[in-house]
Amino acid sequence: MSKVRLIIGREIKSKLTNKTFIIMTFLTPLIFIGALFLIFWTSMPEKIEQNILVLDETGMFSQTLRGNDFVALNFSDKKIEEAQSEFQNSDYTSILHILKGSDGNIIPKARVFFKKNPGLAFKTYLKNELERIYYEQKLKANNIDPSIIASARQPVEIELTKVDEHGNVKNSDSVQLFSFAMGLIMMMFILLYGMMVFRSVMEEKTSRIVEVIVSSVRPFQLMIGKIIGIAIVGIIQFTVTAIISSVLALVLSNVFMKDMLEMKTKFDSQNQMVMKMGTNANLAAVDDFKDNQKMFEALDQLNQINFAEVAIYFVLFFIGGYLFYSSLLAAIGSAVDSESDSQQFMFPVMIPLMIGYFLAIKIMISPESNAVIIGSFIPFTSPIVMMARLPQGVPTWQVLVSLGILYVSFIGTVWLAGKIYRTGIFNVWQEDDLERDL
């Protein structure tokens, strides 16, 4: 046992003193969190103030066309030619020219002249406003009250709510994406650290260092030491990454928190108005209400997840999945002489991981399907599939049974890998023969 501890210590020391490993340990969370906040920042609507000169040939929009906090509308009776000649020296950012047909009727067409491109959001805002007014004008022309149509055309939203065995309820729409993300991260971690074991075995075998090492320890002890050593390195790296990511997320969230709090305050007041008015509320008149509603509902759903429980099970399934696959990858590394030769053996190992990935996708479509439930118990796919199921709520007995099968299966793979490793580690520059190694 002392020899195994020495091998474990050697693996840990070799990885923790590697400059590339240290740099990537600290750089990875910076890149990951930075990318997430960059996506979040770029996805937030940018409110650019617009000062618009409106030339309405129809004379029907001055009372109905609305601006907002960022769009100021200034109606004028000027001709388009005069407005264009004065445009460059004016304070206006755009000219909105609403056209009318040759017969004097409203036509669904408008032109915008601008100094700087106002962007797609501005165009969408104008398009929605003009379409609303055209629609209401058509209804009034046919003696139909637009408010009646607006109250009748209420969108119906289906909210999925899960009731667990204790009678607790929680929404599950946004949780599905989080579940898939957990399964994907699990697959990436298993592959990342499993390949570390594979490369470590390959390096020692091709450099003939292993022949010196096994003169003091048995091949099986060497394999177990490598697997456990890199597992400890993985847990250390995961812990450091989690701590750095949490600190970065806390710091960066404070930067965006002011805007988020303003949006939340605005949403709460709008929500109270909608709840009070019911079907009489004109949601089109409530600026960004629907978008904010979806965003804050998604955040509320994520807050219902027991992140501490998910984190504990993530570590347990990662250790089990890593031990299971790293023993197989160690056996492959000992049976081949180069990474190019390993492709024929790597493919069968990759197939179960890919099946687990596709089952994680299926969870978003049909979380209680037989394929998903069975996949969460098969050790080849359970680390990915069960982690994807966990945030949505899984009976404790299923999680424990899945973990038990995974760890018991690891014992079997270690025994099989040990036989291959014991023979294959000495066969350098010989033709790969799995039957011989077994």
Image (spheres, grey):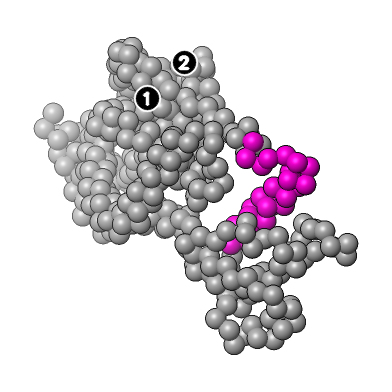
Residues 22 and 391: in front is 391
Q: In the image, is residue 374 above or below residue 294?
A: above
Marks 2 and 1 sit apart, C-alpha to C-alpha, by 25 Å
Report which residue position mark 1 lands on.
170
Please report the residue visible at 38 percent of the width from the left and 55 percent of the height from the top.
37
Q: Quadrant of residue 268?
A: top left
Counting residues from the start of the chain, the first of labels 2 and 1 encountered is 1
Residue 143 belongs to magenta span: yes
Residues 1 and 276: in front is 276
First to last magenta residue range: 120-148
Q: In the image, is residue 385 above or below residue 25?
A: above
User: Magenta: predominant secondary structure element?
Assistant: helix
Q: Quadrant of residue 168?
A: top left
Decide if residue 427 is on the left or right side of residue 342.
Answer: left
Please report the residue visible at 31 percent of the width from the left and 57 percent of the height from the top.
258
Residue 366 belongs to magenta span: no
Decide if residue 255 is on the left or right side of residue 430.
Answer: left
The residue type indicated by label 1 comes to: Lys
Numbered disc total? 2
Report which residue position mark 2 lands on.
374
Q: Quadrant of the C terminus?
A: top left
| Residue 240 pos. (x, y %) | 22, 48
| Residue 262 pos. (x, y %) | 35, 54
Helix, strand or loop under label 1: strand
Does residue 419 appear in this view? no
